Amino acid sequence: MILNKIKKLKPDARPAKVEPIKLSFTALTSREALPELGADEDRRAAIFKDRAAALAERKALQAEIEADKSIDIAPEVAALIGEKPSAKAEKRARVAELRRLEAVAGQAIELIEKRIAAARPAAERAICAAARPEAERRVAALVKALHAADAAHADLNDLFLAIEAQGVSAGGLGQIKPYWMGDAQDPQRRIAAYLREIVEAGYAA
């Protein structure tokens, strides 16, 4: 009797697909903020494509030359004997031309990449400037909520003080004191410090 062996499936080692976060705001892209940057990126992509095509053609020709065992007649020799250069010689000439084109493309890409790097700070400033009105609206909403939280924190702290004034530990209420917010009366408490940073950044607090 032949028993079919069940193959154990190996666990999928590939990382689980993570759904992209759905953002509530769409910032400008670099090319939208600075069209000349987008033009340079498009130009660079086109040159990359042309250089890749030249490289593929050169490698194919080199393989053909390597496999070709016929006599190689250089153009200069062919001219002297009144014949056409060999196909192999013509391929060698094309290989040399492709090498030159690849080198020129590399130089062009290097130059464009320097221009792109130099333009990025301006693009970043433009992106932030375009997003500033929305940032101001959202910061204002956050500031309002933080002021409310700060006031609620102070009210809760008053409750703790009232209980402790009777010589009783407020710990009997359970772990409800928001230690992470700092002392409710401390000028350096987290909410107060953040609100100062907001003002320093040019926003209303």
Image (cartoon, rainbow, N blue to C red):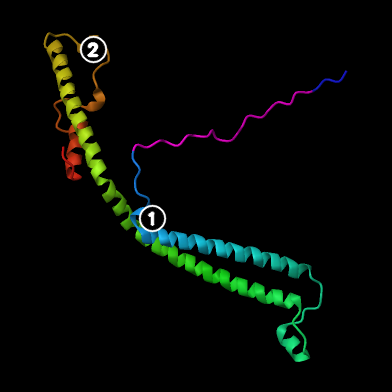
Give percent across and percent down for residue 70: 81, 75
Numbered disc 2: secondary structure:
helix
Label 1 and label 2: CA atoms lie apart by 57 Å
Q: In the displayed structure, does residue 98 sit left or right of residue 118?
A: right
Q: Is residue 89 visible?
A: yes
Numbered disc 1: secondary structure:
helix
Is label 1 in contact with label 2 (beta carbons under 8 Å)?
Answer: no
Labels 1, 2: front one: 1
Q: Amino acid at mark 2?
A: Gly
Tell me which corner region of the image, top left, top right, bottom left or bottom right, holds residue 31.
Answer: bottom left
Q: In the displayed structure, does residue 102 sit left or right of residue 163?
A: right
Q: Is residue 117 visible?
A: no
Q: Amino acid at mark 1?
A: Arg
Q: In the displayed structure, does residue 122 sit left or right of residue 46?
A: left
Which residue is the extreme one toward the bottom? 80
Give percent across and percent down for residue 64: 74, 67
Report the front residue among 170 and 1: 1
| Residue drawn at point x = 47 percent, y = 65 percent | 110
In the rendered view, would you say 2 is above or below 102? above
In the rendered view, would you say 95 is above or below 73? above
The residue wearing badge 1 is 31
Give percent across and percent down for residue 53: 60, 63
The residue wearing badge 2 is 171
Crowd class of label 2 (few under 14; some 14 to 19; many from 20; radius 10 Å): few
Tell me which corner region of the image, top left, top right, bottom left or bottom right, holds residue 202.
Answer: top left
For residue 21: magenta?
yes
For the stretch drawn in magenta, what is the main secondary structure? Answer: loop
